[in-house]
Amino acid sequence: MPNLTTRDLEKLTTEHPDHQMELVGGEIIIMSPSGLESDEVAAMIITLLLNWVRPRKLGRVTASSAGFRLPNADGDVRAPDAAFIRSDRLPQTTENYAEIVPDLIFEVKSKTDSVTKLQEKIQQFLTYGTTVGVLVDPRTRTMEVYRLNTEKVVLGDGDVLQVPELLPGWELAVAEVWAPEF
């Protein structure tokens, strides 16, 4: 199959709005819908992040359908489950793929995801300028926090995620993001 472009990705996304797609290495990856649990966890992370960011006008918070064009030779377009971009880096939104990488990303593992693939995706974002990447696993109730050229930090229930270099004062209690049981 020939190398595909962002134009091909845009066309397919328009034709199939119910599928999430990414352009990686000239190939379009179609991702299956996530399960309810992982989607609910991502929604909670987005909500808690947005509730801190928006009133302070610190930047933008996006969900998994927002594509970011990576500055690599292949022009990869990737979409983290949740992302934050500082306001000074993107003062005005765009209807196109963002031409920058987010400052903070979250990947929430769903039933069909490979942890290794999610870790590779986070590392790719870090390589191109993302400051912090977080892998969230609802099954193990853990968050793996990645920063470029440092060891990952694993957080569990009872721990608090802080990202002072991007969001001074923001705290996310790990136990707060898990799907509730009624």
Image (cartoon, rainbow, N blue to C red):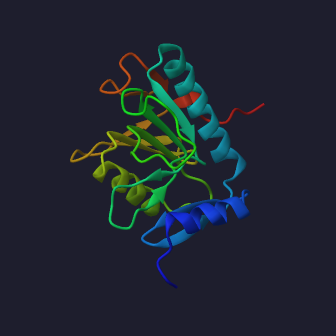
Q: Position of residue 152 (x, y in %)?
A: 31, 45
Q: Residue furthest left?
A: 149
User: Furthest residue to the bottom?
Assistant: 1
Image location of residue 28, percent across then percent down: 54, 70
Residue 172 x, y percent position in the rendering? 48, 25
Q: Residue furthest right?
A: 182
Q: Nearer the viewer, residue 27 or 177?
A: 27
Does residue 113 appear left or right of residue 18 in this picture? Answer: left
Q: Is residue 58 above or below residue 135?
A: above
Position in image of residue 119 (x %, y %): 40, 56
Res 89 → quadrant: top left
Q: Is residue 112 visible?
A: no
As displayed, is residue 7 above or below residue 103?
below
Residue at 60% x, 40% y: name it.
42
* Residue depicted at 61% across the width and 66% down the height: 30
Residue 61 in view here: yes
> Eyeballing the image, is 21 above or below 98?
below
Q: Residue at x 38, y 37 (%)?
A: 103
Q: Quadrant of the C terminus?
A: top right
